[in-house]
Amino acid sequence: MSEILCQWLNQELKVSRTVSPKSFAKAFSSGYLIGEVLYKFELQGDFSEFSESRSSTAKLNNFSRLEPTLHLLGVQFDQNVAQSIITEKPGAATKLLYQLYIALQKKKKTGLTGLEIQTMQPQTSVRLQNLRSVAFREQRLNRRRQNEIMAKIQAAIIQIPKPESNCSLKALEAQKMMKKKKEAEDVANEIKKFEALIKKDLQAKESLSKTSLDTADQTTTDLLNTYSDDEYIKKIQKRLEEDAFAREQREKRRRRLLMDQLIAHEAQEEANREEQLIHRLMRQSQQERRIAVQLMHIRHEKEVLWQNRIFREKQYEERRLKDFQDALDREAALAKQAKIDFAEQIFKEKEIHQRIAVERAHARYEKHYGICAEILDQILDLSTKVADYRLLTNNLIPHKLMNDWKELFFNGSPIYEQASLKHGVTESSAEQRVELEKKELLDSKDYEEYKVPTNME
């Protein structure tokens, strides 16, 4: 069934997104494609307000706009169906699209527009209200029970007067200020110690540089023969610049490292303070613990009710699917039986047709056989008549007699006499009538020859 729906969506409607049986539930979980299908049939006028986003607010917006249109078409749609489609429950989107397909095909056959369907909305709304009254009654009962439970909880809560927290807050602020001052003093002392160490290092390096300069002055006197004064001075200046640059870089790295450590230390202290504050705020009294236990119990009961509701809806869904499958099976069985009956009827008609064809062929054969037998009898009569005449007369047959025999042969009349005419015409029979016909035929022939004489040799 999902393949037929995919073919309808992709080829006939040509929706914006290609739908396959594997991604059927995911494609319709946002409700956007359902709105697009209704928009193509001019039933969803606010389709521009739909969103393709998969967020919960977008899905809620889409399905809330779809609900009146689906109810208008007579499609069963409520909160449970929407929840099943949003959670991509197997078979939920397929069933809804199948109902929508049937409703749209009925609309297409009737030729009703969206406005005409809206005029029929009161009747459909009454029918839907009757169908959904049970679900609404259950929702009202559940809401009433929840309100009663919350009222009992509110009545059980004992309002404990809060102590004046001005002194405690001031003390906390004073402690924070003292702690911050102490941390600042510690950081300042560490910075002073670090700077003192840096100064000591600089003094030691300066003394080393002075000694290196003294030794350099002593060595310059020895190297005057090989190097000039300018080159030597340039080398010394370059070396001093490199040493100064290296010292600056080391100081920058040390200060950067110190600042990173200081920032990390402050962040850790801030996190510790926040954790302590949260721990103090989250301390619960005995009454709060009791209320928390009651709330947990209520939440557990609510979860049990919700699970029972889901289980019952699942059973209803399975029953509906089973009924739907049974209906499909019955239709398939009826179609199969109708096909078998039709095949049997065709077979019987073929047998009747063959029997009629055989009877017609047999009748044709009998007719042709009779004609051939009659012609053969006449040929035999003519030949025997000629043979008898020649045997008796031992001579040729007269031309006129031969013509009379031929005329009788061509007209299918018997050559031999069938009965005598001595008894009169009153006692005529079939043979006598044949003889009379023969006589009339020969007389008419003689008359024609008389009218048109032929040259006789």
Image: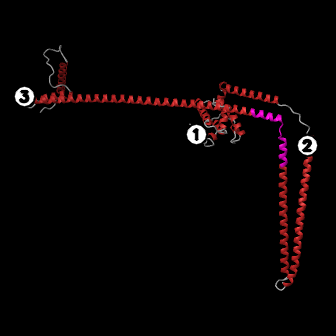
Kindly indicate the quadrant of the structure image that contains residue 33: top right
Q: The disc labelled 2 sits on which kind of residue?
A: Leu
In the displayed structure, 363 sits above or below 428; it is: below
Whole-Å distance between the Cαs marked 3 and 2?
168 Å
Q: Which residue position is annotated with label 3?
A: 392
Q: Is residue 149 magenta?
A: no
Residue at coordinates 70% horizontally, 27% vertically from top-left? 138
Q: Nearer the viewer, residue 369 or 133?
A: 133
Q: Residue at x 74, y 27 (%)?
A: 145
Secondary element at image label 3: helix
- Residue picked out by circle 1: 6
Q: Residue furthest bottom?
A: 225
- Magenta stretch bounds: 272-297
Residue 83 occupies which quadrant of the picture? top right
Q: Residue 71: image x %, image y %?
A: 66, 30
Q: CA distance from mark 2 to mark 1?
A: 67 Å
Tell me the crowding category of disc 3: few under 14, some 14 to 19, or many 20 or more residues within 10 angstroms, Cα based.
few
Q: Which mark is residue 169?
A: 2
* Residue 379 vs residue 177, the one in the foreground: 177
Question: Could you tell me residue 137's position as x and y percent?
Answer: 70, 25
- Whether 295 is among the magenta residues is yes
The reply, left or right, for residue 348 in relation to residue 310 is: left
User: Quadrant of the image for the C terminus?
Assistant: top left
